[in-house]
Amino acid sequence: MDIFAKLQNIVTPLRISNDPAELYCYSSDASYIKGTPDYVVMPSTTAEVSEIVKLAQKHHIPIVARGAGTGLAGGAVPLCGGIVLDMSRMNRIIDIDIRNLQVLVEPGLIHADLNRALEPHGFFFPPDPGSSEMCTLGGLIANRGSGMRSVKYGTVTDYVLDLEVVMPDGAVIRTGGRVMKSASGYDLTALMIGSEGTLGIITGARLKIHPLPEARAAVLAHFNELEAAGRTVSAIMEKGIVPSACELMDSTTIKAVNTYDANLNIPDCEAMLLIEVDGAPCSVESGAARVAECCRELGAFDVTIAYSEPEMKELWAARRLAGAAVTRLNPGKTRVYIGEDIAVPLSAIPEMLREIRNISDRHGLNIMTYGHAGDGNLHTGMAIDTLDEEQWEVLEKTADDIHLAALRLNGTVSGEHGIGSARGMYMIKEHGGALDVMIAIKQALDPHNIMNPQKVGLE
């Protein structure tokens, strides 16, 4: 059975490959996980995706959808070989419907490109992942992503009105509609969001959009006590202030960022908070002042408020460098994304920060801690010599301790990056009997287990 020839009958020969060099390019995402496909196909229409899935279903061939490959949990890695669907050619904005506050897009559209197209209309798509300039909307939806501004605006789940999905048998369904709310039937849209391609392949999305805020301000606060910074996060919320973003960097991160770019000159301290408020100009000024006052009350020794775009851009520069700066503390070593996406309740942030410090000391491994403290989502950064097996063992034990600490504090092992194949072993501990329900749904919709197998801890 010549599967390659059959795939060529569905798409043009230039949009399919089984060349080993090209297959290698699709053997990993931004994580450490590897797996080589047998074929790479680049569909350009929903009809092509449907025909490819029908072929895969008929011959029980694994099929993995891939956006830009920016995932950090191995979600788009073909662990069982088979077909990788490169969705990057399906990248159109089909409709910008300002009257109904929504857009219709294809899954391969880059996140930042959508916001560039919306800006002249005075609107934006609020979920704000750090990989905005690279990640695709299909991948963002499939992984239930969010980003820096989810404190006020929520995650991608809050913005998806309707999805076009190719099911495991090749059937094409729509999960929602054009209305802002519906109480009709099961919420299949929510089921597909975060399913990581294990239940179907997203080929279109109708998304809510939001007016751009009239004004913004950023408050930068430095602390000499790490846990004080953590307590400040929940204290701000308790005062009824809902910032659009609330980001944290610990001393290890600050040191790495200063090493990466000495011009930033961040003060030597245990932690830094960067809090942004937005809205009407009068409320922004008042909100920023209240945030600054709260930071001082909780022990911040240096507080700065920025109102102009150039000033805010300068304040945000350090935070945006955090992910790239990890290896500056460990020259010659490589960052490995593992244990990097835990989330805990806001009240547990100080304890989680303390736990991470203790884990770092226990294993003798530098851990940078930074991230979206405003919604409890903390990122950790670690780097090792990836050719040293002993360092891999230390890294894996460290990551395991971080995951288990988050679960002990009633948290989750993934706030926004997804489970993929990196965190499946924690699903039973986090979800208990609910995991059996997930497995039953997977088996009902995908009985031959062709859709992104060995992911999300479903087998």
Image (cartoon, rainbow, N blue to C red):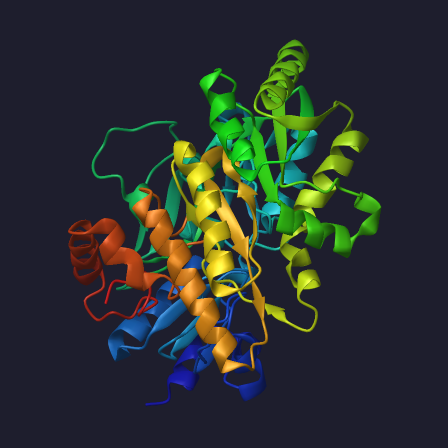
Rendering coords of residue 237 (x, y %): 48, 22
The answer to whether residue 155 of the structure is visible from this angle is no
Query: Which residue shows up at 51% across the image and 62% down it?
Result: 337
Which residue is found at the position 26% from the left and 64% from the top? 169
Q: Quadrant of the N terminus?
A: bottom left
Q: Position of residue 15 (x, y in %)?
A: 54, 74
96, 359: nearer the viewer: 359
- Residue sitting nearer the eye, 185 or 73: 73
Please indicate, yes or no, whether residue 69 appears anywhere in the rendered image: yes
> Against 319, is 449 above or below?
below
Q: Is residue 308 above or below residue 399?
A: above
Residue closest to the far right: 263
- The total number of labels drawn is 0
At a point 29% along the width and 29% down the height, the residue shown is 182
x, y percentage for residue 357?
A: 50, 51
Q: Residue furthest toward the bottom? A: 1
Left or right side of 375 for 268? right
Work out whether 184 lies above or below 265: above
- Foreground residue among 195 and 5: 195
- Indicate the quadrant containing the C terminus: top left, top right, bottom left or bottom right: bottom left
Picture quarter containing residue 160?
top left
Q: Position of residue 238 (x, y in %)?
A: 45, 19
Q: Image check: 92 left or right of 52?
A: right
Residue nearest the observer in this picture, 2 or 126: 126
